[in-house]
């Protein structure tokens, strides 16, 4: 038996002012997009903004449903919309922010497993790392790519015969 440790690296910032201009723009857009969230059940309003290689920013918010599993997270709304509007354009980055009880979360938002899987697919599809920016009032995490967030992820290679 061999014990293997997997180490992940992230950058932690204390304020959006420490981010570069493009990162800050993307975070601001994700923060604004929380306003369009439809979250009457959880009251957890999430916004996600995707930066494309052509400079376009595409945003989405979580959309809930009385039949709970029919809803969708902000990250997947934004990524699926970006990829359906611009199927040939690479995704460079995604920023995520969330509000509850009228305030942004203190901790950086942590994307769910399904959203991590979709980020990984997008990264693999375009062969381009996606920078992930997780906003929180106290800290902001910047993660180099989706496979950092989803180690040992399931990819198309497993489907090859
Ligand atoms: N949610 C997101 O949209 N993104 C995340 O990263 C975490 C969770 C949504 C799903 C659901 O509408 C609500 O937040 C509570 O889980």
Image (cartoon, rainbow, N blue to C red):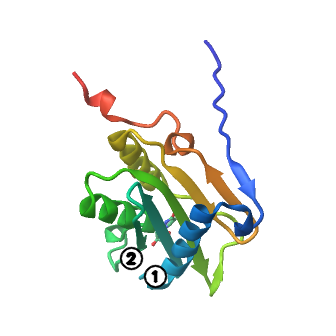
Q: Local crowd at mark 1 within 10 Å, few (<14), some, or many (≥20)?
A: few
Circle 1: element type = loop
**Could you tell me if the residues under marks 2 and 1 are in contact, i.e. CB atoms within 8 Å?**
yes
Of all residues, the one furthest to the top in this rendering is: 1
Q: Earlier in the sequence, mark 2 or mark 1?
A: 1
Q: Quadrant of the N terminus?
A: top right
Q: Answer with the quarter of the image where residue 148 lies.
A: top right
Classify residue 88 as left or right of residue 139: left
Question: What residue is shown at x 78% (from left), y 63% (from top)?
Answer: 14
Residue under numbered circle 2: 64
**Distance in Å between CA atoms under marks 2 and 1:** 7 Å
Q: Answer with the quarter of the image where residue 2 lies.
A: top right
Asked whether mark 2 and ligand 1 are closer than 8 Å, the reply comes as yes
Question: What residue is shown at x 53% (from left), y 80% (from top)?
Answer: 32
Locate residue 4, reporting x and y percent. Answer: 63, 22
Query: With respect to residue 113, does 82 lie above or below?
Result: below
Asked whether mark 1 and ligand 1 are closer than 8 Å, the reply comes as yes
Q: Answer with the quarter of the image where residue 64 lies.
A: bottom left
Circle 2: element type = loop
Residue under numbered circle 1: 41
Residue 42 visible in the snapshot: no
Query: With respect to residue 127, does 85 lie above or below?
Result: below
Query: With respect to residue 65, does 121 lie above or below?
Result: above
């Amino acid at each position: 038996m061999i014990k293997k440790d997997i180490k992940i690296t992230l950058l932690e910032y204390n304020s959006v002012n420490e981010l570069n201009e493009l990162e800050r723009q993307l975070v601001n857009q994700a923060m604004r997009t929380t306003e369009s969230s439809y979250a009457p059940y959880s009251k957890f309003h999430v916004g996600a903004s995707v930066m494309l290689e052509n400079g376009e920013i595409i945003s989405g918010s979580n959309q809930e449903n009385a039949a709970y599993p029919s809803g969708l997270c902000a990250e997947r709304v934004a990524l699926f919309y970006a990829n359906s509007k611009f199927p040939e354009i690479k995704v460079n980055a995604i920023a995520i922010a969330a509000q509850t009880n009228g305030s942004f979360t203190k901790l950086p938002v942590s994307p769910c497993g399904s959203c991590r899987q979709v980020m990984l697919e997008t990264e693999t599809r375009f062969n381009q790392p996606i920078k992930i920016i997780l906003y929180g009032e106290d800290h902001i995490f910047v993660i180099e790519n989706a496979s950092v967030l989803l180690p040992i992820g399931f990819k198309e290679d497993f489907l090859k015969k």
